[in-house]
Image: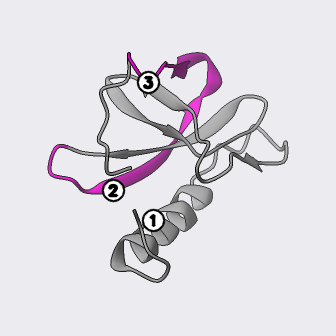
Amino acid sequence: MIKHGSPDDIERMMARMDADKTRPIDDPAPVRDFPKYGRPLVYVGGIYGKAVAWTHTYGPIEWLDPSGKYHMGWAHSSSIKRLSPEEWKGSSRL
């Protein structure tokens, strides 16, 4: 569990700000956030992560790399596959 104001919390906030700067410009739709504790489990191009938000055509995805470093990036909705908890092989630290 991430505590408010922890280094992990700050790292995630910075990653979200960086991801928002690289949002694809061809989708002017509003970004809608998933609830923090209800984010869908997803698979995108070899990455197991969680969907943070969505628009009509894109969504920011969060994941941990093998070293445990946190990442966030945008993916096209056609490449995002929702998974059940049984199918998901991501880190329990997300």
Coloration of the structure image: one colour
Compared with 81, 9 (above or below) is below
Spatial CA span between label 1 and label 2: 7 Å
Q: In which quarter of the image is residue 54?
A: top right
Which disc is residue 85 wearing? 3
Q: Mark 3 vs mark 1: which is more N-terminal?
A: 1
**Mark 2 highlights which residue?**
70
Which label lies toward us, 3 or 1?
3
Residue 85 lies within the magenta run = yes
How many discs appear? 3
Corner quadrant of residue 82? top right
Few, some or many residues within 10 Å of mark 3 (<14, 14–19, 20+): few
Q: Nearer the viewer, residue 62 or 92?
A: 92
Magenta stretch?
A: 66-86
Q: Where is residue 40 in the image (x, y as percent from the top left)?
A: 57, 33
* Residue 81 screen position, x and y as percent: 52, 18
Image marks 1 and 2: residues in contact by CB distance under 8 Å: yes
Q: In this view, does 34 lie to the left or right of 30?
A: left
Real-space Cα distance between discs 2 and 3?
20 Å
